[in-house]
Structures are given as C-alpha cells and as structure tokens.
Image: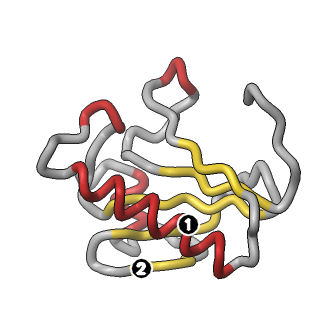
Amino acid sequence: MSECLFCRIAAGEIPSKRVFSDDRIYAFEDIAPKAPVHILVIPRKHVSRLSELSEEDAPLAAEAMRRAAAIAKERGLTDFRLVANDGAGAGQSVFHLHFHLLGGRPFSWPPG
C-alpha cells in the first residue's frame, strides 16, 4: 500500500523516531504525543483496521501487543495503556492497524 502513511513510515520512506523494528513489527514515537511515552506499534503488513484482521493475520495483533508490553518494560513503565481505535468514529485517523502505547502519567476511565 504505497499510499498508506504507516506503510511508508515502516518502509523508511518517511522519517520516524524508531523504537523497534524487525521483519513483522515496527514501533515509533508518535509525532503528537498524548502522554510522556506515546509509541505507535504497527504490523509491517498492511491491515486497515482491527475489525478487518483475518484469522491468518490475527497473530500479528498478538505479536504487536507483546512487543508493546516489552517496550513498556524497557521504558520502565509499571502502568501503561494500550489502545487500538477501530474506525473513524472511534478516533482512527490512519487506516493501518496500530496500537498506541501510552504511559508516564495517570489515566482516567472512561477515556475521552
């Protein structure tokens, strides 16, 4: 998906502050952070949204969540929030599956 912003970031076509990279997952700092730690964790394979994840690709979501937890631990976070928005009405603005890893400040419930 050459027009997808996150595909282009993962491919290195658009600069980002890389946090983690392997052949399946890419993580980078959000350019408009909502917390002291705000990292986006994405699969390199393009999947538009969580609800469109196929059974075959479902392990990508689990792998991304495990990587987010590992990054949180590396950053010294004992408490963190992991968010996946699904659809424009839920706040998804880039239609490439991604998880927001947020930490470094207290959070309330329900969110926004």
Q: Quadrant of residue 86?
A: top left
Q: Residues within 10 Å of mark 2 (few under 14, many from 20)?
A: some
Residue 55 or 3: which is nearer the viewer? 55
Q: Amino acid at mark 2?
A: Ser
The residue sitting at the right extreme is 106
CA–CA distance between discs 2 and 1? 15 Å
- Compared with residue 52, is residue 3 higher up or lower down, i.e. above or below? below
Q: Residue at x 56, y 66 (%)?
A: 69
Q: Position of residue 20 (x, y in %)?
A: 49, 79
Residue that mark 1 sits on: 69
Q: Residue at x 35, y 37 (%)?
A: 49
Q: Amino acid at mark 1?
A: Ala
Q: Residue at x 72, y 52 (%)?
A: 32
Residue that mark 2 sits on: 21
The residue sitting at the front extreme is 78
Left or right relative to 110: residue 108: right
Q: Residue at x 77, y 49 (%)?
A: 34
Element class at badge 1: helix
- Compared with residue 11, is residue 83 higher up or lower down, i.e. above or below? above
Inspect this view and state whether residue 112 appears. no
Labelled disc at residue 1: none
Given this view, does label 2 or label 1 mark the residue nearer the observer?
A: 1
Q: Position of residue 103 (x, y in %)?
A: 75, 58
Q: Quadrant of residue 37?
A: bottom right
Total numbered circles: 2
The residue sitting at the top extreme is 89
Element class at badge 2: strand
Q: Residues within 10 Å of mark 1 (few under 14, many from 20)?
A: some
N-term-proximal mark, 2 vs 1: 2
